[in-house]
Amino acid sequence: MAVFEMLERLIAGRRLAVPIYACTGRHVLAFLEQDGRRKRLEGSGVVIVADTCVVVTPIMPELSGGVLMTNSGKFAHYAPGNTGYAVLYASLADCVESAVAGKPRFTDLAA
């Protein structure tokens, strides 16, 4: 649940230009549905995937030359071979900012 709370804080009511696919178990999904959080997240552009992963199950659209961004090292490793997408690895905050902007955004670590 903590990841979804962080995701909600980072989105802060904004609309995503490109979707964020958030994979979770059905037990967490039940908690998100109890107080309307699932509806709010999906309304902002989050696609919640229960009991599977987009690397294993072909959920994402086929996109020639597509690039995805993830905060998961495991996902970053397996995604290119299983989805055909190139991968950018970043923090959850950078993933959210990129989804809002519709293009990659990275925190300026030199600042």
Image: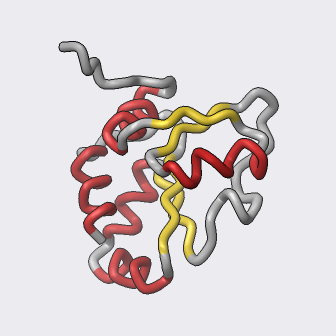
| Quarter of the image where the N terminus is located | bottom left
Q: With respect to residue 1, does 105 lie above or below?
A: above
Front-most of 69 and 47? 69
Residue 109 point in image, percent of width and height: 26, 21
| Quarter of the image where the C terminus is located | top left
How many numbered marks, from 0 up?
0
Residue 62 point in image, percent of width and height: 80, 43
Q: With respect to residue 6, does 12 lie above or below?
A: above
Residue shown at 72% from the left, 42% from the top: 80
Front-most of 73 and 91? 73
Left or right side of 96 for 78: right
Residue extending furthest toward the left? 111
Residue shown at 54% from the left, 33% from the top: 88
Left or right side of 8 for 95: right
Left or right side of 84 for 30: left
Residue 23 point in image, percent of width and height: 52, 64
Residue shown at 40% from the left, 66% from the top: 39
Residue shown at 53% from the left, 57% from the top: 47
Left or right side of 15 for 88: right
Residue 24 point in image, percent of width and height: 48, 71
